[in-house]
Image: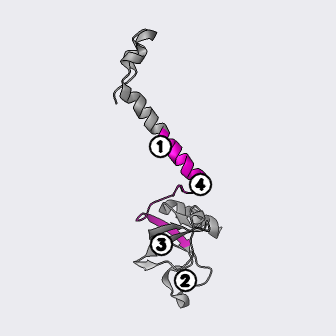
Amino acid sequence: MEKLSQDAINSNDNEVYFNVSYSYYKDIADALNKLKEYEDLEERGLLIKLPCKVGDTVYLLSNPVNVTNFEEEYNEKDILIFECEVQSISKYKDGRNQVRLYWNNKFVGCYLTLEHFGKVIFLTREEAEKASEEENV
């Protein structure tokens, strides 16, 4: 990256403003305007920091009944790790949100929200395995 202030450091105080390019100040002004825009959106509840994006792989700790629909094969206390794909993340007018996951190209049939990240939805298999071990202790 070009060091924009280098000439200013090597000059006297009267030359500082002449040696730093106009584009430097324009870049700062643009960045501050963008920051203001994001702060305004956040203040109005229109900006959400998402833990992942649609299409990412996440790991779900769940009873297989919620994922596979094979009720007879599993005990209701069984909790397994499922590698899923994030299909959508939605926020509704009433403030609720929903994360839709797919496993083997099928919708995961339990209601999941952003609040489930770090509890039953994990970004890495290692995090899911650690949480599963703690659950079984």
Q: Which image quadrant is residue 10 in?
A: top left
Question: As displayed, is residue 75 above or below residue 117?
Answer: below
At 40% from the left and 10% from the top, the residue drawn is 11
The residue that disc 2 covers is: 65
The residue that disc 3 covers is: 101
Q: Quick one: SS at disc 4?
A: loop
The residue range painted magenta reads 33-61
Quarter occupied by the C terminus: bottom right
Residue type highlighted by circle 4: Arg
Separation of marks 3 and 4 at Cα, in angstroms: 28 Å
Q: Earlier in the sequence, mark 2 or mark 1?
A: 1
Q: Earlier in the sequence, mark 3 or mark 1?
A: 1
Q: Quick one: SS at disc 2?
A: helix
Image disc number at residue 34: 1
Separation of marks 2 and 1 at Cα, in angstroms: 46 Å
| Whole-percent x, y for residue 80 in the image | 53, 74
At 45% from the left and 70% from the top, the residue drawn is 84
Residue 29 placement, left or right of 112: left
> Closest to the observer: 79 or 105?
105
The residue that disc 4 covers is: 44
Q: Quick one: SS at disc 1?
A: helix
